[in-house]
Amino acid sequence: MLNFGIVDAIDIIIVAVLIFSILKLFRGTRGILTIIGIFTLLLLVVIANVFNLKTLRFIVTGLGSMWVVIIVILFQNEIKRTITSIGSVGFSRYILREEREKIASEISEAVKLLSDKRLGALIVIERRTRLDPYMETGIKMEAVVDANLLVSIFSPFSPLHDGAVIIRGGYIVAAKAILPLSTNPNISPATGTRHRAAIGITEETDAICAVVSEETGTISFSKGGNLEKGLDPDALKNKILESLEKGGG
């Protein structure tokens, strides 16, 4: 007969909260399936101990300290993002709803114009994680977010059209910024550099990205390392607004 007391209940609650927090941290990233796999292995350890399955316990626990190394290798981007976000909060979560709607409207209007003209564009919107390291790679600016200004920046005649625009709060704070390219092996080989950069920055930070394909004019949205293609300007606006309202969620 099992003896179950208050201490055991507290123990279970703490473990449940820990598991929930880890899953929430990696939600929307390519690491979520691996996290589930790790928890499955841990469950096998428990089962092996409870039923005294010696062979299974030897195989699973035999990894020993290798687990730490494996986790660091698998989740280096997620760990980097978490460390970067600690004690570093962007401005976007503090702006008023009216300002968020204005930002989303100006970006969606710019993207529509860029899409119609087949002008490639990559617009990064900061949320909780500050993007200062990426701003340093580009040309710093301080201009109110405006559709016409964004279109002019990505014009092929502009010296700023290569690279990404970074938006913080209601301001364009950098142009021609260089972003990290995703190394996710599951991405299609046909995915261009601009879209890989959008996925890369949203893997490493909680930023969101609007992308316009130079070849097709297709509008895409990236968040949490995922890329959603074939959006219309209104759908993009709603996704930006929803993401800004959630802050870093």
Image: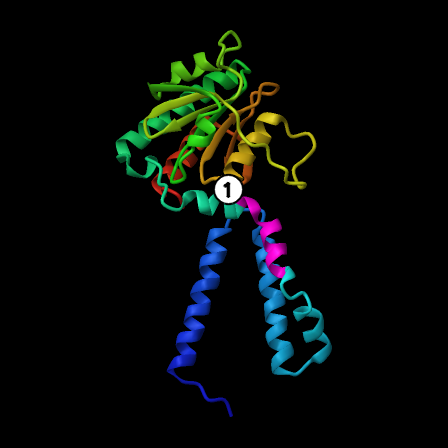
Which x, y percent locates residue 16? 45, 67
In this rendered view, identify the residue nearer to me: 131 or 124: 131
Residue at image coords 56%, 20%? 217
Residue at image coords 51%, 7%? 157
Residue at image coords 62%, 73%? 45
- Vertical order, 112 against 11 (above or below): above
Let me know if residue 28 appears in the view: no
- Name the kind of residue labelled 1 in the image: Gly
Q: Can you identify the residue that label 1 sits on?
A: 224
Which x, y percent locates residue 119? 53, 16
Residue at image coords 56%, 30%? 197
How many neighbours does mark 1 have within 10 angstroms: few (below 14), some (14-19), or many (20 or more)?
many
**Which residue, as the protein is rendered here, is positioned at the far top?**
157
* Quarter occupied by residue 42: bottom right
Q: Which residues lie in the magenta part?
A: 67-77
Dominant SS type (magenta): helix
**Residue 94 falls inside the magenta stretch:** no
Which x, y percent locates residue 187? 65, 37
**Residue 70 falls inside the magenta stretch:** yes
* Quarter occupied by residue 236: top left
Which x, y percent locates residue 14? 42, 69
* Quarter occupied by residue 171: top left
